[in-house]
Image (cartoon, rainbow, N blue to C red):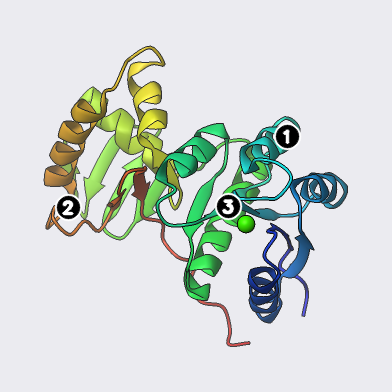
Amino acid sequence: MASKGTVLMIEDEENIRDFIAASLRAQGYKPVGAKTAKEGMALAASLCPETILLDLGLPDMDGGEVIRNVRSWSQIPIIIISARGQEKEKVRALDLGADDYITKPFGIPELMARIRAAMRHGTIAAQTGACADVFCVGELRLDLGKRLLQIGKEEVHLTQVEYKIVAFLARNAGRVVTYDAIISHVWGPYMDDNNRILRVNMANIRRKIEKNPAEPRYIFTEIGVGYRMAQEEEPPGPAA
Ligand code: CA
């Protein structure tokens, strides 16, 4: 079977590394492990993996330094592996340029979905330098060129700010986007603590696009971190 790509795991706990590596191999990826931040940065540079899984708690260096280092030369998708209760660290890692995170303990299907989303994003960014002009998921269709949002055949009227939020999330579909990243994208970097205004806008957006705003289908809340726009999964390939 042709490899689906190299995944570099920077994680000091051997049992977690082995467990992830076995799962990746079973899914057709090529796993490579690093025990320390230094080793991880060296392997990232020499292998140019398709995705990096990064544990934030490493023995030699803060995981944030690894993100900064890799982002200084590459847009390789980085998925953070974090422990519960590390919300602040996760948010910081995302703001430093990580693409997504997964919280221990996690299931393998969840990890694989994150890796697929990250790789798809990496490929789109590398191939076109921009995202597609039309974003679709479920009944939702967003034409970024025409600034037109539809649910089914119905056009949805958004305010400027609501549109900016939805478009930004759509361009990052499948990935968690932090509150700060949305706020600085929509209102600029100098707006202090706009979480309340963002929440109000999100409530309005959900009322317009979700059948049941309490159980969103399109935009999910990542508590304490940010929001995630749903992404259409690729149809399953032929059975392996
Ligand atoms: Ca660790």
> What label sits on residue 210 in the rendered view?
2
Residue beneath disc 1: 69
Q: On screen, 38 above or below 97?
A: below
Q: Amino acid at mark 3?
A: Ile
Looking at the image, which residue sits at the far front? 59
Residue beneath disc 3: 79
Q: Position of residue 143 (x, y in %)?
A: 36, 40
Q: CA distance from mark 3 to mark 1?
A: 15 Å
Q: Position of residue 78 (x, y in %)?
A: 62, 48
Q: Secondary structure at mark 3?
A: strand
Q: Amino acid at mark 2?
A: Glu
> What label sits on residue 111 in the rendered view?
none
**Quadrant of the image where one finds ligand 1:** bottom right
Q: In screen coordinates, is 145 left or right of 74?
A: left
Q: Amino acid at mark 1?
A: Asn
Among the two numbered marks 3 and 1 on one chain, the one whose residue lies closer to the N terminus: 1
